[in-house]
């Protein structure tokens, strides 16, 4: 039982359980602060279709937009940057990769990890072996691998696929992906799949119908549907190939098309399923994904005017994905 002893001036000081309660409260508060500090948000930026090449080329790509996007993304100080393919204009031109490394030097100086996927331009103007040699020279940490995975903190897993290779049932790449999904660590809450050709997109009937989803990626969408409902980890797919921005929610999977990294912009006829309703064009942009407290918040930042004296970005889209309750297991 607590006792109260009079202090000078008629005040009282506590003894017994009040003192214990005070000390315990301080300890609990310190624990909460420590937890809050250890669970800082994870930030992943996504974009693609940059087509790095000689800055004198202003028809296939926009070197000013590339430069502004790179600087802005560096300012975000992300934990990782994922690129949805078509890094170079021509994979057979080694200097295009040299230009990539030159323009993205700020990322390396800040030690920002980059998780890239191969696209069709990585295999342009070269035989596959020569193309891959250029790719692996630019990304030596990936040597020998055309598809790969990386963890960004304890709760985020990124897999980068190669859609220039089969990803259909029974393929080597599909078997690898299935193993990745089946062996996701229990703490993983979000699986980010980055690839070039989109599994889900606005179906075009007038222009660039050859950029509509192909059987290879449609098969991937079928697979993701089969696993999404039973996994606690939520799946976000980031594709490119279409030089614009699109967003879909299908079969409990979030699908993004983020192809606004600098390549010549493509207009699209938006379908009702596209959750992005913006009419702005072109859409040079990047997507910022902030992961914290079991939620992923996505924001698309559009470059308003690349040639402006002080380039400005506007958030044009936002979405949120929440992890499933703990009862649902990664299995």
Image: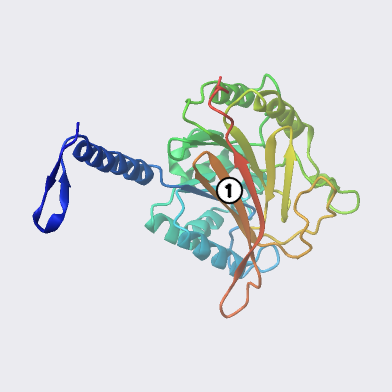
Q: Which SS class for mark 1?
A: strand
Left/right of residue 72 with respect to residue 161 in the rendered view: left
Numbered disc total = 1
Q: Quadrant of the C terminus?
A: top right
Left/right of residue 270 with respect to residue 323 in the rendered view: right
Is residue 21 among what the camera can see? yes
Give 57 or 325, whichever is nearer the viewer.
Answer: 325
Give 296 or 125, whichever is nearer the viewer.
Answer: 296
Callout 1 crowding tier (Cα within 10 Å): few <14, some 14–19, many ≥20: some
Estimate the x, y position of residue 230 in percent, counting from the top left: 64, 22
Is residue 50 among what the camera can see? no
- The part of the image, by quadrant, that contains residue 20 is top left
Estimate the x, y position of residue 28 in percent, counting from the top left: 30, 39
- The part of the image, by quadrant, that contains residue 180 is top right
Left/right of residue 299 with respect to residue 272 in the rendered view: left
User: Looking at the image, which residue sits at the far front?
Assistant: 10
Estimate the x, y position of residue 19 in percent, counting from the top left: 19, 40
Give 182 or 232, whichever is nearer the viewer.
Answer: 232
Q: Quadrant of the N terminus?
A: top left
| Colouring style | rainbow
Give 302 or 140, whichever is nearer the viewer.
Answer: 302
- Above-or-below relation of 299 to 280: above
Estimate the x, y position of residue 219 in percent, counting from the top left: 74, 28
User: Looking at the image, which residue sits at the far right?
Assistant: 206
User: Looking at the image, which residue sits at the far left?
Assistant: 8
- The part of the image, by quadrant, that contains residue 108 is bottom left
Q: Which residue is mark 1?
A: 297
């Amino acid at each position: 039982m607590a006792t109260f002893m009079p202090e000078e001036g008629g005040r009282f000081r506590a003894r017994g359980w009040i003192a214990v309660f005070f000390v315990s409260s301080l300890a609990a508060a310190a624990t909460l602060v420590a937890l809050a500090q250890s669970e800082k948000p994870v930030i992943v930026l996504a974009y693609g279709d940059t087509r790095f090449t000689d800055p004198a080329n202003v028809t296939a790509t926009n070197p000013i937009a590339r430069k502004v996007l790179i600087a802005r993304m560096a300012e975000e100080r992300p934990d990782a940057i994922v690129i949805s393919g078509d890094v170079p204009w021509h994979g057979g031109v080694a200097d295009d990769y040299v230009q990539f490394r030159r323009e993205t030097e700020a990322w390396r100086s800040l030690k920002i990890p980059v998780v890239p996927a191969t696209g069709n331009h990585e295999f342009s103007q070269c035989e596959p072996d020569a193309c891959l040699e250029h790719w692996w020279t630019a990304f030596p940490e990936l040597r020998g691998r055309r598809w790969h995975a990386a963890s960004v903190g304890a709760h985020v897993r990124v897999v980068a696929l190669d859609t220039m290779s089969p990803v259909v049932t029974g393929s080597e790449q599909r078997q690898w992906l299935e193993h990745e999904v089946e062996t996701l660590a229990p703490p993983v809450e979000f699986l980010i799949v980055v690839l070039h050709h989109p599994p889900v997109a606005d179906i075009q009937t007038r222009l660039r119908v050859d950029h509509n989803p192909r059987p290879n990626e449609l098969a991937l969408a079928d697979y993701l549907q089969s696993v999404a409902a039973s996994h606690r980890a939520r799946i976000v797919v980031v594709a490119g190939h279409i030089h614009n921005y699109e967003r879909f929610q299908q079969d409990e999977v979030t699908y993004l098309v983020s192809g606004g990294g600098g390549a010549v912009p493509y207009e699209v006829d938006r379908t009702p399923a596209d959750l992005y309703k913006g009419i702005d064009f072109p859409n040079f942009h990047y997507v910022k994904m902030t992961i914290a407290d079991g939620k992923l918040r996505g924001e698309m930042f559009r470059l308003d005017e690349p040639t402006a004296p002080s380039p400005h970005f506007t958030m044009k889209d936002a979405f949120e994905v929440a992890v499933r309750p703990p009862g649902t297991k990664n299995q």
